[in-house]
Image (cartoon, rainbow, N blue to C red):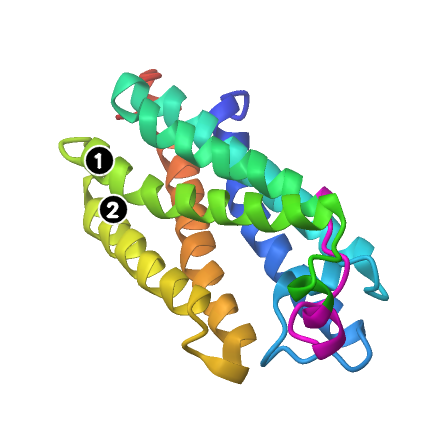
Amino acid sequence: MESDPRLWLGRLAVAGPIAFTVAWLFAGLAQVEYSVRREDISALAALDAQHAWIMITGFLLLAAGTVALGVGLVMTLKGRAVIGSILVMIAGIGLLVAGLARNDCSGELSACAERVDAGDVSWHSTVHDMVSLVLFLALIAAPLVLAGSFRGAEHWHDLRSYSIVTGLLGFVLLVSFVIGAAGSWSGVLQRVFVSVLFLWIALLGLRLTQVSRGRAGQGDPAGA
């Protein structure tokens, strides 16, 4: 049973969001004069961050867990989950790129904001922002698409409504963040937004491990 690769893929999917959350918590505490209320998570991995390696590690572990979930879903649900799983894997690859293509500085700080407005930013900072938008859109679309795959799937159908709510709530929170609806509380809003999406990854990873254990014991590799 322990040799079932889906079991380890599920465990990695659970561990990724946990590691990412721990990373921004500890990096935020270690960073001098950092405001969780108004500054975003990426600032903790920026070029001027004091302990950037903590947040970069969090990005990389989350990326690995997200890709692992996508692969595990394809192995378990087969063809019905291909499109949704590809969206999950795209998000995982995006997280990898976002973790390595670092911002120059914290865009919520006035000096950095002036640089951004003037276009005085590095290519990797631009890549980070563009890829972040793409990966978030992929993670919003993935639950909505996979909700259809969960219909009729014996061990997944109860996650259908939760996935729909996750996708819709994620979209509302992303729009609110982009338009600056939270004002000086944008850092908190971003953390709520990413937590909604990453909790979905962790819970699906947990379900994947449960299905893998149960199906391995029954000798059924399909897990659907």
Q: Position of residue 59 (x, y in %)?
A: 66, 48
The relative height of residue 174 versus residue 16 in the rendered view (above or below) is below
The relative height of residue 87 versus residue 82 in the rendered view (above or below) is below
Give the side of residue 112 with respect to residue 210, left or right: right
The image quadrant of residue 72 is: top left
Asked if marks 2 and 1 touch (Cβ < 8 Å), the reply is: yes
| Label 1 SS | helix
Q: Position of residue 56 (x, y in %)?
A: 74, 50
Residue at figure coordinates x 52%, y 22% from the top left:
5
Identify residue for label 2.
159
Measured Cα–Cα span from mark 2 to mark 1: 7 Å
Residue 104 covered by magenta stretch = yes
Q: Position of residue 135 (x, y in %)?
A: 49, 43
Residue at figure coordinates x 57%, y 34% from the top left:
93
Identify residue for label 1.
150
The relative height of residue 192 versus residue 134 in the rendered view (above or below) is below
Nearest the eye: 39 or 113: 113
Give the side of residue 114 with respect to residue 5, left or right: right
Range drawn in magenta: 100-114
Res. 51 mark: none
